[in-house]
Image: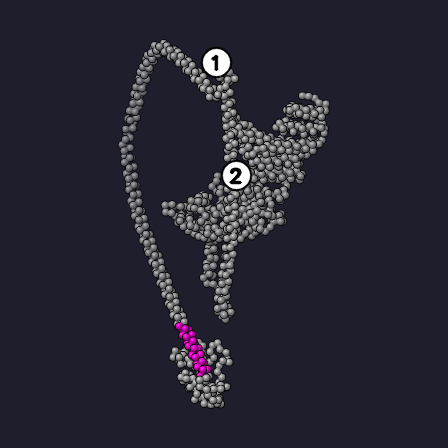
Amino acid sequence: MANFAKPENALKRAEELINVGQKQDALQSLHDLITSKRYRAWQKPLEKIMFKYVELCVDLRKGRFAKDGLIQYRIICQQVNVSSLEEVIKHFMHLSTEKAEQARTQAQALEEALDVDDLEADKRPEDLMLSYVSGEKGRDRSDREVVTPWFKFLWETYRTVLEILRNNSKLEALYAMTAHRAFQFCKQYKRTTEFRRLCEIIRNHLANLNKYRDQRDRPDLTAPESLQLYLDTRFEQLKIATELELWQEAFRSVEDIHGLMCMVKKTPKPSLMVVYYAKLTEIFWISASHLNHAYAWFKLFSLQKSFNKNLSQKDLQLIASSVVLAALSVPPYDQTRAASHLELENEKERNLRMANLIGFNLDPKADRGDVLSRSALLSELVAKGVLSCATQEVKDLFQLLEHEFLPLDLAVKVQPLLVRIAKFGGKLATASSVPEVQLSQYVPALEKLGTLRLLQQVSRVYQSMKIEHLSKMIPFYDFSVVEKIYVDAVKHNFIAMKVDHMKGVMMFGNLRLESDGFRDHLTNFAESLNKTRAMVYPLPKKASRLGDILPSLAETVEKEHRRLLARKSIIEKRKEEQERQLLEMEREEESRRLKQQKITEEAELKRLAAESELRKKQRLLKEIEEKELIEAEKILNDVNRNKKKGKKPLLDGEKVTKQTLLDMAVHEQIKEREEREKKLMKLSKTMDHLERAKREESAPLIEAAYQQRLVEEKMLHEREQQLEIELSQQRHEGDVKEKNRLVRMLDNKTIFQQRVMQRRQAESERRRQEREEQISRMIQARKLEREVMRKKIFFVRSEEERIRKQQEEEEARKREEAERRRREEAERKAKLDEIAEKQRLRERELEEKAERQKREMLARPSIEPRPVEPVVPAPAAPIAVTTAPPSAGRYVPRHRRQEGAPAAAEPAPRGTRPDDRPALSNDRWRSDHSDERRPSSFGAGSKSTWSSSRPR
């Protein structure tokens, strides 16, 4: 150990040693300076020395030296300049992290390089043997030798810093920062073992803080800043534990947080409590503690609703739905009903512990049922308005599972609700502490609850039911799963039922008539009857005045509405089809592009794999050649060293191959083995001669000992035989005396035996007769029961057959009546069509005849011109009679229609103008003798015209 007058001299000496490559000596000199009692007062050069010291510790990976130096430096600057210690520690952690990151960057496969279960464990002997025996000389071994030690050193750095900074009020912030960085290290590289140890270290630090209260510079947990740092560290520990899925460690972290809150008797900020309850919900769900999970969700909902002012209605609705579904997921029966007293006490203690963690202060002397229960939670949810905040599907599900009595339709109505509920969930934008809520996780528990409710309600209504029918009623599970569910429910006295697999029937037990469930059943039955009556006999509605006035308006509007809807549907379908085609084209284009990209990537991967395989083969061949060369040199050295006299030794300069050396070694081994065998043969002969001499000498002695043993055993046998004869005689004499004493009681014994036998025989005969009489009575009773049952079955079947026939006759009558009406309607329509067709033909004939008469009337004067005479107006009455058309809607016989057909020709034909008609008063061809010319001008048609104008 060198003594320096000034610390600067030690720093210069260390730099000189570093320049010549003696880092270990430089580290030792600085370590001696720091641990020396001469320099216990803080100076500025000591800080530079510590920076250089930690750099050497990191380069040489000397964790022990770093810990000793930092502890000594903490003693030096604790009361003078704590910030200097903080800077040194930060520099130390920065260097360790940088070295580890550099090593990680050099490794191409981090997961393979860090495939170590425990960073603190040394190499096992079998691992060392395997590394020497196997030919592992590639990148994997280099990764293990380079990357893993640096991460092990980084982990030791975090442990060292935490140990130095523990329970120091002046370094609380640095302690919390180091703990957070250590947590992130465990999270980033999935170091579960180190995370458990880290949690245990922090837990022990807090325990020591409470144990040694008279320590100097002890942190004061009642101070808000210190408490906040400790709570932040514990909450970070809880988050990392849940992310690493270390649920036991997460639960212990929750207990640490609760213990810290109880210690200082202060409640953290609501934002931290939200994280606390959010993690509690995850832990309780993983541990299948559904009741505690539901209570944790309820507390989380209360906190969010009370303190989160930015909470949106959608997020609030989703959280409320989670609370209600979590409460419904709790099994509806007590699972510790048949437990022992010790188990009940343990369960009660556990429930009190869980209630304290959740935040419910309970009386430890209270009954277990009053601690935390499903019914109390559901009542509280309804009273606090949580159910009203949930979605409509959750409300309907709650109503069906807790209040409705639908033994046959419960599962059918619950299933679509569960399908819709499973689609709800997602990230909460306004509740950052609760990142995501998925309602689909409650679906299996709700299906089980629906199955239990259905079995419970069916057991109240039915005494037995076929297994096949029950399986159809429960679409959630197969019957094997249903059987497991009801076995568990029967075990906990939730329902009473049993299964007869031979008959395929489930039989339910009788429940008490005064039970609440049966009263609810009667109430529900009355409500269902009221609904049925309202559907069968609806209230009369007032007739619409508009419907009386326009009876066909509603039908016309409906037809027009349907037509417009159909047109809209066709347009939408065409648009959807066009969009679908475009989407399909885009999808095909994308699939072709991806396929081409995949082919290109596969070709590139194959090329890279082929190149890698080629390099690997070349490396292996090179390694094999090097190994063979090393083995040849080793064999050559062994042969030259063990060569016997008389043989020509191998010179170092001779060229020998590995095969030659192997042949020489094998030859030498064969010769050595032959020599060993010769020695063994000679030794075996010597041993045979020695053994033969020993046996020849010992044979007479063995014979003499054998004869002496025979004499002794003969004497012993005679003595034992004589003793046995004397004992037999004594036993015989005693037996004879006992016989003589008992012979006088033989008659009494015989009489008693006969009496007992007679009494038992009489009793047996009496019981046999009673049994036969009972069997005969049972046979008669069963015959009567079967007779009554057959009569009932016959009556029921007869009644069903009569009702069926009556229904068939009624349906046949209705079909005949409908067919008759249809035929009458068809006949009526046919008659109307025929009448309309005849009317059209008659109108067409009249039009043609009127047209023909008009042409004849116009063409006649040009043939026979007449002198102009005074025009005498024709009588109007006959014309008025002849021009009157038959009234619309009045039936006219066929012969009347033929007689009136010419009279209809007088009006103007359809499609002509009024000025085309022939003038009556100003006709130049007419004269006073119009009566005489009328027959010649109109011809034969005028007779029918005037004849039809006469009154009928």
| Quarter that holds the N terminus | top right
Residue 858 located within the stretch drawn in magenta: yes
Disc number placed over residue 604 in the picture, else none = 2
What is the secondary structure assignment of the residue under circle 1? Answer: loop
Where in the figure is residue 880, as x and y percent of width and height? 46, 84
Establish if 192 lies above or below 496: above
| Quarter that holds the C terminus | bottom left
Under mark 2, the amino acid is Glu
What is the secondary structure assignment of the residue under circle 2? Answer: helix
Q: Is residue 188 left or right of residue 829?
A: right
**Residue 827 location, quadrant:** bottom left
Establish if 534 lies above or below 874: above
The foreground one among 131 and 899 is: 899
Residue under the point 51% across and 40% down: 602
Residue under the point 47% across and 55% down: 524
Question: Is residue 702 visible in this depiction of the protein?
Answer: yes
Where in the figure is residue 451, as x and y percent of width and height? 46, 48
The residue singled out by tag 1 in the image is 648
Q: Is residue 783 left or right of residue 53?
A: left
**What are the residue bounds of the magenta stretch?**
834-860
Under mark 1, the amino acid is Lys
Question: Is residue 464 visible in this depiction of the protein?
Answer: no
